[in-house]
């Protein structure tokens, strides 16, 4: 029942054809998908699914299914019933996804500009945040913006790297995010490398070059608890 996760190899794919595998109460599963399911702090994709007869259905959100590489596409209430085996054409809401990609990669930079354990994070289309286990006094919005934007302006090509669970266990320092442990059991773990800047496990979708982020500004810095000092950012440019 698992889907080929097309976004994992090419985050820039906007459309694809697929076949319906199953229609369940939560939503539909496909043999392949472009739709990123909510996870690792990144919001799920939305978009459209077009049937062979031209009928267009809205996919309002995407969630992980009940097993590895299973993805459930949520349809708007009242959508017509699809049939297993029918061919469909998928299209993601690209403007929304591209914002998520730029913000997600920006958070990886933020985790390097602020050197403290990450205790949480979240990415929605208009803003993103990381929580750090750090003294609030050490977080200076102006310094964070300046140092992050210097990295963005310099640019760097991002790379996906796969390692085995055992290799990750031998390098626990790679895991910065204490609240989100990388998924295990599949035998291998996906990492995002920003050469010279960052290397950490991540299953999310990222821009090909950090220059595409354009720039960030700090919206808020506040305490959300003893171990959670929250830094919230937004994009400044259109990329
Ligand atoms: Zn990530």
Image: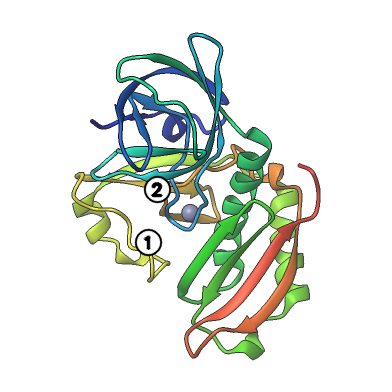
- Taking the spot 49% from the left edge, 31% from the top edge, the residue there is 79
Local crowd at mark 2 within 10 Å, few (<14), some, or many (≥20)? Answer: many
**Secondary structure under badge 1?**
helix
Tell me: 20 left or right of 136.
left
On the rendered image, what quadrant is the C terminus found in?
Answer: top right
Q: Is residue 142 above or below residue 138?
A: above
The residue beneath circle 1 is 174
Locate residue 95: give its quadrant: top right
Image quarter in which the N terminus is found: top left
The answer to whether 153 appears left or right of 83 in the picture is right
Q: Residue at x 65, y 83 (%)?
A: 222
Within 10 angstroms of label 1, few (less than 14), some, or many (20 or more) residues? some
Picture coordinates of residue 207 (x, y %)?
60, 40
Q: Is residue 66 above or below residue 176?
A: above
Picture mark count: 2
Which element type, helix, strand or loop, lies under badge 2?
strand
Toward the viewer: 119 or 94? 94
The residue most toward the front is 78
Q: Is residue 70 above or below residue 106?
A: above
First in sequence: mark 1 or mark 2?
1
Q: Are marks 1 and 2 in contact (CB under 8 Å)?
A: yes
- Horizontal side, residue 43 vs residue 8: left or right: right
Front residue (pair 154, 96): 96
Disc number for residue 199: none
Q: Residue at x 42, y 51 (%)?
A: 202
The residue at the far right in this view is: 237
Q: What label does residue 191 carry, if any?
A: 2
At a point 21% along the width and 44% down the height, the residue shown is 186
- Residue 109 placed where, x, y %? 59, 59
Q: Is residue 47 left or right of residue 126?
A: left
């Amino acid at each position: 029942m698992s889907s080929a996760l097309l976004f994992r190899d090419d985050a820039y794919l906007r459309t694809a054809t697929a076949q319906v595998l199953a229609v369940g109460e939560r939503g539909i599963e496909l043999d392949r998908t472009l739709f990123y399911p909510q996870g690792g702090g990144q919001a799920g994709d939305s978009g459209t699914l077009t049937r062979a007869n031209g009928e267009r259905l809205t996919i309002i959100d995407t969630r992980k299914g009940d097993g590895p590489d299973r993805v459930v596409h949520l349809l708007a209430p009242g959508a017509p019933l699809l049939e297993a085996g029918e061919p469909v054409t998928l299209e993601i809401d690209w403007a929304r996804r591209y914002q998520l990609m730029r913000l997600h990669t920006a958070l990886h930079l933020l985790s390097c500009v602020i050197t403290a354990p990450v205790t949480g994070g979240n990415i929605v289309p208009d803003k993103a945040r990381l929580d750090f286990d750090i003294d609030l006094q050490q977080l200076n919005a102006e310094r964070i913006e300046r140092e992050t934007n210097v990295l963005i302006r310099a640019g760097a090509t991002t790379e996906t790297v796969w390692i085995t669970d055992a290799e990750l266990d031998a390098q626990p320092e790679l895991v910065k995010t204490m609240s989100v442990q990388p998924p295990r059991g599949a035998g291998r773990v996906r990492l995002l490398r920003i050469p010279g800047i960052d290397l950490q496990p991540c299953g999310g979708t990222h821009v090909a070059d950090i220059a595409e982020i354009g720039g960030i500004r700090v919206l808020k810095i506040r305490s959300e608890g003893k171990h959670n000092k929250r830094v919230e950012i937004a994009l400044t440019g259109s990329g």
